[in-house]
Image: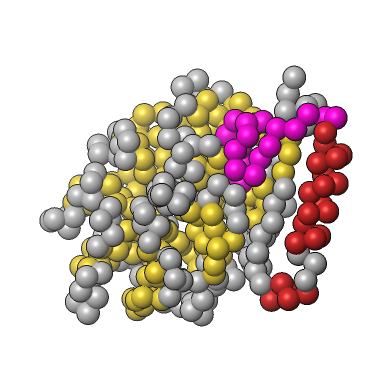
Amino acid sequence: MAMRQTPLTCSGHTRPVVDLAFSGITPYGYFLISACKDGKPMLRQGDTGDWIGTFLGHKGAVWGATLNTDATKAATAAADFTAKVWDAVSGDEVLTLAHKHIVKTVSFTQDSNCLLTGGNDKLLRIYDLSNPEAAPQEIAGHTSAIKKALWCNDDKQILSAAEDKTIRLWDRSSMEEVKTLSFDTSVSSMEYMSDGEILVITYGKTIAFYNALSLELIKTVEAPAPINSASLHPEKDFFVAGGDDFKLYKFDYSTKEELESYKGHFGPVHCVRFSPDGELYASGSEDGTLRLWQTAVGKTYGLWKCVLPGYTASILKSTVSIFLGIYSNADIAEVHFCFFFSFFVYI
């Protein structure tokens, strides 16, 4: 008896969502940040998608966004030639880092003391956030715009992917290139998993897994459509991917078998990531929405409740009544909020 996947839809953005990232698990749960071409990155509660706040200050599309592990800091990369660091608790802008071109990617070190950036000027920059007046360290080598840059190997090394159809591994101390991977087409996404040192990359219809330290290939999987992003489950049982056909695919990591596919978005999927506890994955799309999907369909988690068919109508009726009773005041017209109700039925 199968159950239907019912994603939670997070509205609020007005343009395509191009990047997203989860924090680690904190005493207050975990959090989700999204980057959007509307220039207004948003922070949400990770397990429910509830809107917490919007970071206001950029004057162009925001291409990259990230949170530090404990969700106290956020960083964003934008088309206004800046990267910004934010206090993720208060929402205040802490620091603006000027660049010479569009910034596409940002990444904190594990201790949150340094920020790595990359973008259209083809340079990697490392900023010391404890001394923001100091000039950043710069690493040159890519011949086209940098799309993604990540710390790896306990922040001793850096991985970068660029429009020059390469992924490069850099040594932080020497600032020298360690190894380069070349592809026939530009890499569309890159995810690093410190547990097991696995690098997940996508290009064309291919999802590839590499050892992040040696850049030796582990395996590749071919998807039915061009893929823009993929994410490996924390326990490495399976992975998800999304791309140009509006679908989310779930594959078994060991056998490479396609397990599920869902069409929930109304545009290409640009980014997908598993939550830190592995209970859900988030996707961002050209349609301007984020969607949260259950890893184990039918499990009671967050706002998902497993409801038997006979109770569906009564629960919907009572939920709508409660919603109307709470939010009937016209004063909420100026308040940004997300309200979600999701249920599963046996089919």
Residue drawn at x 78%, y 29% is 308
| The one of 294 and 171 positioned closer to us in this rendering | 294
Residue drawn at x 20%, y 74% is 131
Colour scheme of the rendered structure: secondary structure
Residue 111 percent coordinates (x, y):
25, 56
Residue drawn at x 66%, y 72% is 335
Q: Is residue 297 left or right of residue 146?
A: right
Vertical arrangement, residue 231 with respect to residue 258, above or below = below
Residue 83 visible to the viewer? no
Q: How many discs mark residues in the rendered view?
A: 0
Vertical arrangement, residue 158 with respect to residue 58, above or below = above
> In which quadrant of the rendered view does residue 199 lie?
top left
Quadrant where the N terminus sits is top right
In the image, the segment drawn in magenta is 292-310
Judge whether residue 293 is colored magenta: yes
Q: Is residue 331 left or right of residue 62?
A: right
Vertical arrangement, residue 296 with respect to residue 160, above or below = above
Q: Is residue 40 left or right of residue 21?
A: right
| The one of 176 and 47 positioned closer to us in this rendering | 47
| The one of 145 and 92 positioned closer to us in this rendering | 92
> In which quadrant of the rendered view does residue 2 lie?
top right
Residue 1 visible to the viewer? yes
Residue 143 percent coordinates (x, y):
33, 61
Residue drawn at x 51%, y 34% is 239
Residue 99 percent coordinates (x, y):
35, 76
Q: Residue furthest left?
A: 174
> In which quadrant of the rendered view does residue 296 lie?
top right
Vertical arrangement, residue 253 with respect to residue 37, above or below = above
Residue 158 percent coordinates (x, y):
27, 52
Quadrant where the C terminus sits is top right
